[in-house]
Image (cartoon, helix red, strand yellow):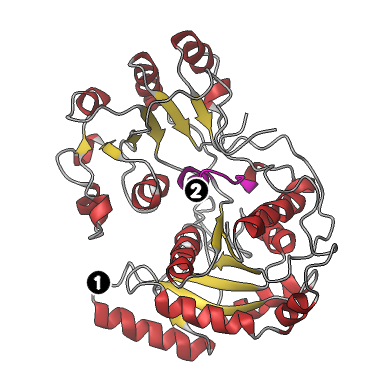
Amino acid sequence: MSGPAGPGPAGPGPDQRPTRYVILADGRLELHAAKTAIGVIRYGPHPVVAVIDRQNAGRTVADVVGLAVERLRVPVVASLAEALAGPVRPTALLIGIAPTGGRLPEAWRSIVRDALQAGLDVHSGLHTFLGDDPEFGPLARRLGRRIVDYRRPPERAETAVGRRHRPGSRVVLTVGTDCAVGKMTVALELRQAALEAGRRAAFVATGQTGIMIEGWGVAVDRVVADFLQGTCEWLVAEGEARGDWVFVEGQGSLDHPAYSSVTLGLIHGTTPHAMVLVHQAGLTEHDFDHLPDRSFPIAPLRPFIAVHEQVAGLVAPSRVVAVALNTVAIADDAAARAEIERVAAETGLPVDDPVRFGPRRLWAAVEAAVAALPWVVENDARGSTAEGATPEGAVGAVGGPAR
């Protein structure tokens, strides 16, 4: 069974060195391609000493991606050698991209090799498991280094059993109008606002970047389809053991031509009491460029909200209670607020950008709306019964750096 801090598939058990990352994002350091790098820098527990990207060397990550966030003021360097020669030596190389198909760029192989030979561990969220690589795996073992593949699925394989939520819990799933619009970020921001309001709150990581940040979870897009909903079910059970408010990181979008299946599995597996729809202002087409003569438009928000509630209701009732609007493409705060008001009028729901303007307003709206949902009231009324208790074996059987 894998645990939240277990070793990767190649190398010894965990050592006692504190983790300090150098992140590899060479030629890919922008908001979309390097979302793993940016997420780990912004929300992760471990310091990042540098990011490798030759074309932006000498700048900071904040300058490159255009976000005035203090934690993103990480230096960009041209090479691994430059990062190793800096004032603070890294202890691990983190692969900072999440490309379509999840393969390591061929040009990066020499950097991974050099990192292992320099005594660094390697952390990766790619679909290609670096610990299984015929060169990297044996090299890591010979040098006494670890390769952690965050996307490796857990050994636990179960179908859904229809588990009911613990009375007193509130499960909220972030869903989106497209990939990479901020579903993880919104869940993290809402969790933080709930904690600041004095609530017991947990974040359930369902993707590699979330696991890197939180230290536990499962990259559900690597789980065999038959076990996807069952995995989501016991992930929520673990979340309910950690908090009363459980914010589940969403993946993909329900109408995405490539990634709709993982969204559906999350909705039916987590059976959320409520959903928060995440949308990027100004986005008109899905992130899908494989058919040059065809595009897939972003769905109108009101009908798309209804689709989510109808699809969820096939298994358990749920409601979209708010919209988190990603306004990163709008330069002016006043214009961003105007777009927030427009979307609120369009949808009839509370709308805000919890990153740009803080999550408190959106959190307050979500908390009030969820408390009034009839299925939440009914579940609370069941009290602490055996039916609502966590199933045996659910708690603690989490993924993470799985082996």
State the image coordinates of residue 351 (x, y, percent, origin top left). Answer: 45, 81
| Residue 48 located left or right of residue 109 | left
| Place of residue 177 in the rendered image (x, y in percent of width and height, measured from the top left) | 53, 68
Q: Residue furthest top?
A: 142
Which residue is found at the position 73% from the left and 65% from the top? Answer: 166
Query: Quick one: SS at disc 1?
Result: loop
Residue count near mark 2 (Cα–Cα under 10 Å), binned few <14, some 14–19, many ≥20: many
Which residue in the structure is indicated by mark 2? 214
Residue ranking furthest to the left: 58
Residue under the point 69% across and 76% down: 309
Q: Which image quarter: residue 222?
A: top right
> What residue is shown with label 1?
331
- From which residue to which does the magenta span run? 208-220
Q: Where is residue 340, by image quadrant?
A: bottom left
Task: Indicate which disc, 2 or 1, sits on the residue closer to the N terminus.
Answer: 2
- Given the image, on which type of amino acid does mark 1 rest? Ala
